[in-house]
Amino acid sequence: MKNEFQVIAELIEKDKKVLDVGCGDGILMEFLKNNKNTNIRGLEISKSKVQECIAKGLTVIEGNAEKDLKQFPDKSFEYVVLSQTLQAFLNPELVINELLRVGKKAIVTIPNFGYWRVRLHLLIKGTMPITKTLPDEWYNTPNIHMCSIKDFFYFAKSRNIKIFKSLAINNQDVSIINDSNLTIKNFFANLGIFLIEK
Amino acid sequence: MSAENNIKTLIVKKPLKLDCGKTINEFPIAYETYGSLNEKKDNAILVFHALTGDQFVTGQNPITKKDGWWSYAVGPDKAIDTKKYFVICANVIGGCMGSFGPSHEDPNTGTAFGTNFPVITINDMVNAQYNLLDHFGIYKLFSIAGGSMGGMQVLQFISNFPDKAKTVIPIACTSSHSAQNIAFNELGRQAIAADSNWKDGDYSSKNTVPNKGLAVARMAAHITYLSKKGLQEKFGRKLQEREDLKFGFDADFQIESYLRYQGSVFVDRFDANSYLYITRAMDYFDLAKQYKGNLSDAFRATRAKFFIISFTSDWLYPTQENKDIVIALNSIGADVGFVEIESDKGHDSFLLDVPDFLSALKNFLDKSYTEN
């Protein structure tokens, strides 16, 4: 399992009810189910990925986070997880609000557009950045609302969203982000992980 | 047909009070089983059939000599694996394959009930079938499954008996018959009633059969089971064994010939009055209404695991109506999975060889069973 999922799993306490939004083929769900005794549900837009989850015995609903989160009652999950898809939504703010309505807490991860390789790519090459976490070309990328760790930090503050924990991942290294090291982490991390609540 | 030796029948001794207010006593439920019940009796699956189905789910139907209606899904190593599970299916009451229905003799008149048979509902159907659990000594079913009207019975069953099934699989169905659904059923009923051989339902004592009306009802309904794309790809404007149009009202087009054939074979195996009764039961189905408009309340008492399946090209019970059930379940935090299967075979997809559907069904059942 990738490092990101290990970090997410560590943020989730045992025996809790969790919704994985955009759960993909269910790797994180499977891990949480087996290791944290989590009562876990998934929401996934791709039919073939839903099928993969069913084959793993996972409870998944085919659906779209922008439209289908509204069917879940307020605070019906302890945690709602959204891994690296916030930037792909037409309206990320609405999705964040929905995550925080449905979940007591939300865990959101973002590919960091402030990462130095991204900056360097644009600076030197003058073309849209392509990195390990952002592998697509500008014309076929699903990522239409990129942001940096700093952007997300400021966004949360402006909306009175409480950040319990924010972590920076730079390949295998995981470190805590705080107000004082924000600029540095925003430069060196390719991924940001935020545990938030409203 | 009930006299056929091939039909297993349970005579239900317990009186059943129907929704219409009448009570039926000592009535027959015709059923069939596949596979074997294990010692713990925890591997039973109750399958519910759709409008024109019967208890002969798979293998050769001993009455019609055709394949069972769910032969693609049920059988050894199939999605519902009869090597593993004990599959039970009953003919619905109101039906015509041995269960108590309008073609049975009314002891008061000595002739068939016809339209004197009490109007039955989906609720009555599942309450009648519940007796099979006692018959087999099954405390809790591993699963209940069915498509279309079978799915409606699944929903009604779990709402009536919330702790009697571990997993619940409603397929291509709805929690409430729409105006369009009722309209199509009414078309079929009117076709039957317009046949002069129908005789207000009393055709058996007059030795006639309203075959023409029933065939038209089947033809109209059959169109609703397919998709426009499916029809276009299969038939298009292809002509039936002729080089050119004949400028008449014979079946020039293959689709006409196909529908006529579907109508003609249907009347050999189905009773016109049963068609009236069963379509009526479907039209009356409105599970939310039974819970004062709150569908979630129908499922509040159950801990069962739901898996809901719809098909992209099903316009009779479209995805949104299936999703409404998912939404009702999610709003009470029930354990529910949902997938919409890509298929251009229309509503009938659940009866056909649709690999994504069959694998989803198999995976869900087998994974849930190992967690037993």
Image: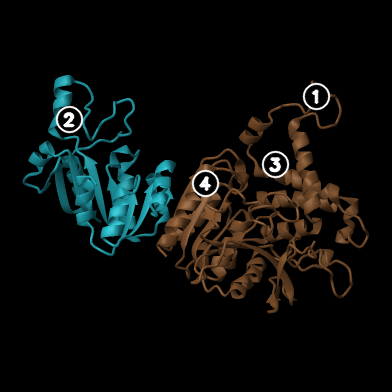
- Mark 1 vs 3: CB contact within 8 A: no
Residue B34, placed above or below residue B70:
below
- Mark 3 vs 2: CB contact within 8 A: no
Q: Nearer the viewer, residue B20 or B217?
A: B217
Identify the chain of the residue marked 4, using the numbered disc in the image. B
- Mark 4 vs 2: CB contact within 8 A: no
Q: Nearer the viewer, residue B26 or B19?
A: B26
Measured Cα–Cα span from mark 4 to mark 1: 38 Å
Q: What secondary structure is marked by label 1?
A: loop
Measured Cα–Cα span from mark 4 to mark 2: 43 Å
Give amino acid for label 1.
Arg
Q: Is residue A162 left or right of residue B308?
A: left
Measured Cα–Cα span from mark 4 to mark 3: 22 Å
Identify the chain of the residue marked 3, using the numbered disc in the image. B
The mark found on residue B242 in the picture is 1
Q: Colour of chain A?
A: cyan
Measured Cα–Cα span from mark 1 to mark 3: 23 Å
For mark 3, what is the residue? Answer: B223
For mark 4, what is the residue? Answer: B357
Identify the chain of the residue marked 1, using the numbered disc in the image. B
Q: Nearer the viewer, residue B58 or B116?
A: B58
Q: Colour of chain B?
A: brown
Q: What secondary structure is marked by label 3?
A: helix
Are marks 4 and 2 in one subunit?
Answer: no
Give amino acid for label 2.
Val
Are marks 4 and 1 in one subunit?
Answer: yes
Give amino acid for label 3.
Ile
